[in-house]
Image: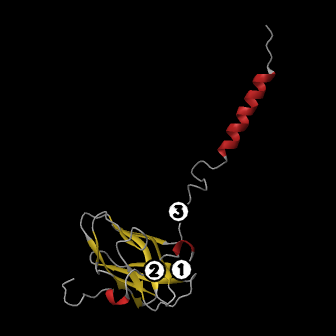
Amino acid sequence: MSFTIKPFAALAGALVAVLSLSACGASGPDAPTRNTKKVTDGAEVDSGAIKVRDLLLVAQPDGSAVLVATIINSADSADALTGITANGITGLIGNAPVVLATDKPAIFSGVSANAVAVIPSLNVQPGNRVPVILTFTGTPEIKIDAIVREQAGIYADVTSPVTANTLQPSGQKKPGTTK
């Protein structure tokens, strides 16, 4: 019986090459993929139990901007978003205040939207950032630096689904209601 080492050496060499190439150097505590914090250009902020995700504004042809964001309340009790200000301009909110029930996200814009907010006359060019202030009933105000995006690409369908006369200035009660 003749036994040669060459086939086994070739197989072992191939196995070492495959294992070393598949590691890519992207493992361990300093791996670049571990250090990725954000995958969107929207702002993200946590304030106590309130979590704001992917907040940005989409510029509209009339100079207004539509809020895109998800706000989550993880507290044991409900809170409410009572006001939005962008670049010093009071936003208009549909069905204000926006009730933030525990673990029930308020989604501004998109196919799953259950809330709407528009900043009238923002008149900020896409690509610029503006200060946004969110006010709540039970949480201190949240200040965010938000980017304004063009109504194109993934934001092409972001429009206000309601007319301005159905929105209320944030922080105010609707006429004839207790809300």
Q: Nearer the viewer, mark 1 or mark 3?
A: 1
Where is residue 55, by image quadrant? bottom left
The numbered mark, 1 or 3, whose residue comes first in the sequence reads 3
Q: Which mark is residue 159?
A: 2
Q: CA distance from mark 3 to mark 2?
A: 28 Å
Name the residue furthest top: 1
Q: Which amino acid does the dot numbered 1 rest on?
A: Gln
Secondary structure type for disc 3: loop
Secondary structure type for disc 1: loop
Does residue 154 appear left or right of residue 86 in this picture?
A: right
Name the quarter where the C terminus is drawn.
bottom left
Q: Check contact, mark 1 vs mark 3: CB within 8 A.
A: no
Q: Which mark is residue 37?
A: 3
- The residue carrying pointer 2 sits among few (fewer than 14), some (14 to 19) or many (20 or more) residues within 10 Å by Cα, namely many
Where is residue 75, by image quadrant? bottom left
Q: Which amino acid does the dot numbered 2 rest on?
A: Thr
| Residue 92 shows in the view | yes
Q: Which amino acid does the dot numbered 3 rest on?
A: Lys
Q: CA distance from mark 1 to mark 3?
A: 25 Å
Q: Check contact, mark 2 vs mark 1: CB within 8 A.
A: yes
Secondary structure type for disc 2: loop
Q: Which mark is residue 151?
A: 1
- The residue carrying pointer 1 sits among few (fewer than 14), some (14 to 19) or many (20 or more) residues within 10 Å by Cα, namely some
Q: CA distance from mark 2 to mark 1?
A: 8 Å
The numbered mark, 3 or 2, whose residue comes first in the sequence reads 3
Residue at coordinates 73% horizontally, 28% vertically from top-left?
A: 12
| Residue 50 shows in the view | no
Picture layout, residue 16 above or below residue 37: above
